[in-house]
Image (spheres, helix red, strand yellow):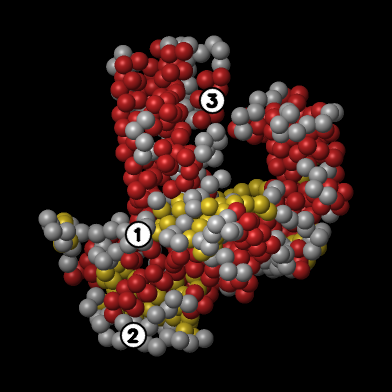
Amino acid sequence: MKKLHLDFETRSTADLKLVGAWKYAMDPSTEIMCLRYSSGVGQPVRLLKMGEFKKPGPQLLDTILCAHSAHFEYAIWNYILHKRYGWPALWDPKHWRCTLAKAAMCNLPISLDGATQALKLPTKKDLMGRQAMLKLSKPLSIDALGFPTYNDDSALKEKMYAYCADDVRAEMALDAALPDLPPNEQKIWELDLVINHRGMKADVATAGKAVVLADTFTKELNTKLHRLTGGAVDKASRIAAIKSYLSTLGVQTPQGLDKNIVAALLRSPDVPELVKEVIKIRQQVGKSSTAKYETILEYASPTDQRMRGMLQYHAAGTGRWGGRGPQPQNFPKGTGFDSEKVCRDVWEPGFQIQYGDKSMDALSAGLRGCLVAGEGKVLCAADYSAIEARVLLWLAGDELALGKYRMGINLYNDMGKSLYGYAITKDSHPKEYGVSKAIILGCGYGMGKVKFRGTCATWGIEIDEATAEAAVKAYRKKYKPVVEMWYKQEEAARNAVINPGSVHPCGKVRWGMDKKREFLVCRLPSGRHLRYYRPSVKPIETPYGEKQEIHYWCAGLGGKLEENKTYGGSLVENITQATARDIMANGMLNAEAAGFPVVLTVHDELVTEIDDTETEQLGDVGDKERLDELVKAMCSLPAWANGLPITAEGWVGKRYRK
């Protein structure tokens, strides 16, 4: 097929950052200011301006369209060029390719500018052109009837046209510099596009009611805070004022008021009750999770209330999905609350009487319940059980531990018995069970006693240093094949860096590096590659002598390229999480093929939306049969995962829940 690179510049009364690409493209006010396109590097970049789209578009049945963040171009093409102007529909994702996806696959910055700079490509950074585009894309004013007035300066338009052309050239250079997604990974990206277009319905009425309640509670709490502090602090959002006030009471918080510090202050018997009251108010008002209700309202379509574009393909270097918009991936767990009940209770006049000083916590817990099935549908969801722990042991070849999983033995209980010397269960010894679970889920990647103790604290489990040290030692003694894998993987990766062009098998993966020293590559069991950009080894001193430490470059939190160092445990963590992600991706493809349309994935959970066929005769039995079908599809593994014991469990219902 021919390939066409393209980029749109648009204008709208809708705010793209607030509503997301899909709702933006569907908004009646959104217009295309220009389209720049080219057939390849060295070819002219053609221009279509506003007013030139009314002619029938070209026939593109044998054409691949390529863009950076192609979800946006896909939505603009189909909802504006096709639906308004009669251009050919290109709903089939097989017609599309994405350079952002290619950059993400290579663990590079995903912005077009960041990716091209990281690769040192000869592209132009046109700041003046970008400023011109921004001035043209947002209305100068909106009249009483809702009609916008835009900047129509011809000089700004010329700068925008040039800026858009430069973006197309940068996309083409990036496309040529990076490997294509492998065929199976391209299918997964295409499914991601389908899922994001499908969206998930929001209960906008309940979300709106929750916003009103949260605002009411916030005002009441701020009034109480003002009274408690004698007027020193009038709003709980003013952290500096709270810290200053606490210092007058003898409580110093130089590290701020994050959740760990707040939890420690609330637990301390030495902290005055007045201080605890102030901190509790800050804790309630500071819940960013309640702001997600507003994001739900922003993202939901006014026509069908579905939120589109909530998933980010390959958000992590391991390939795992991330979230956009409301980001269900970081919804609070809502422990101690029934999210469905909360969604009913927000409509009752006695909400605050019922939940008291936990009202904001209850609202946070209700977020999940605001994601619902469409009309005549139900949600059918399943979650892989301890998938990372299982994959880790499978990669390490620990057949003894895998055998326990196959026999249905709870490895958390098993670990607890090894650590404490007596049998534990979740019900009989909840703290010991929590520690044991933390050991299995956290100690497989080389975690030391200090970090393990901190990890337990984030789970609300306080342990002393001796227990933390004993826990780490118990894991390493019990799971020696995992410990051995840390060192073997590090050695194989290091040897690949030192010897470009050579291949170093290590268990179920293989390491290698191209002779240009551009990428260190780990071939996963699935055949997919993990990539580490511009790797090197640097000598460091350790308590055990000199060691060659592996360094590489990747996208940091701000999206900029930064240098990182790694070690055996971290490499094993990457391999394990990437393999678990490939199991999830395989499960998503299987679910779709089995008639379970996917609407969301959250960590190790798959959420699908199916027809509601409940009858008096079937009831829960019918739900169980359909859930069993989904679990079967998710746990039907490809040949490369032979011997991996995977299980999943889930639920069927109208509202999303944990």
Q: Is residue 627 above or below residue 459?
A: below
Q: Residue 142: x percent and y percent?
A: 16, 57
Earlier in the chain: of badge 2 and badge 1, it is 2
Question: To which quarter of the image does residue 238 belong?
Answer: top left
Mark 3 is surrounded, within 10 Å at the Cα level, by few (under 14), some (14 to 19) or many (20 or more) other residues, namely some
Q: Residue 167: x percent and y percent?
A: 39, 69
State left or right for residue 195 relative to residue 502: left
Q: CA distance from mark 2 to mark 1?
A: 28 Å
Q: Which residue is mark 3?
A: 263
- Can residue 338 be seen in this snapshot? yes
Q: Residue 161: x percent and y percent?
A: 29, 72
Q: Secondary structure at mark 1?
A: loop
Q: Nearer the viewer, residue 58 or 561?
A: 58
Question: To which quarter of the image does residue 462 belong?
Answer: top right
Q: Nearer the viewer, residue 31 or 619?
A: 619
Earlier in the chain: of badge 1 and badge 3, it is 3
Circle 2: residue type: Gly
CB under 8 Å between callouts 3 and 2?
Answer: no
Q: Nearer the viewer, residue 61 or 372?
A: 372
Q: Which residue is mark 1?
A: 301
State left or right for residue 92 relative to residue 547: left
Q: Secondary structure at mark 3?
A: helix
Circle 1: residue type: Ser
Q: Which residue is mark 2?
A: 57
Earlier in the chain: of badge 3 and badge 2, it is 2
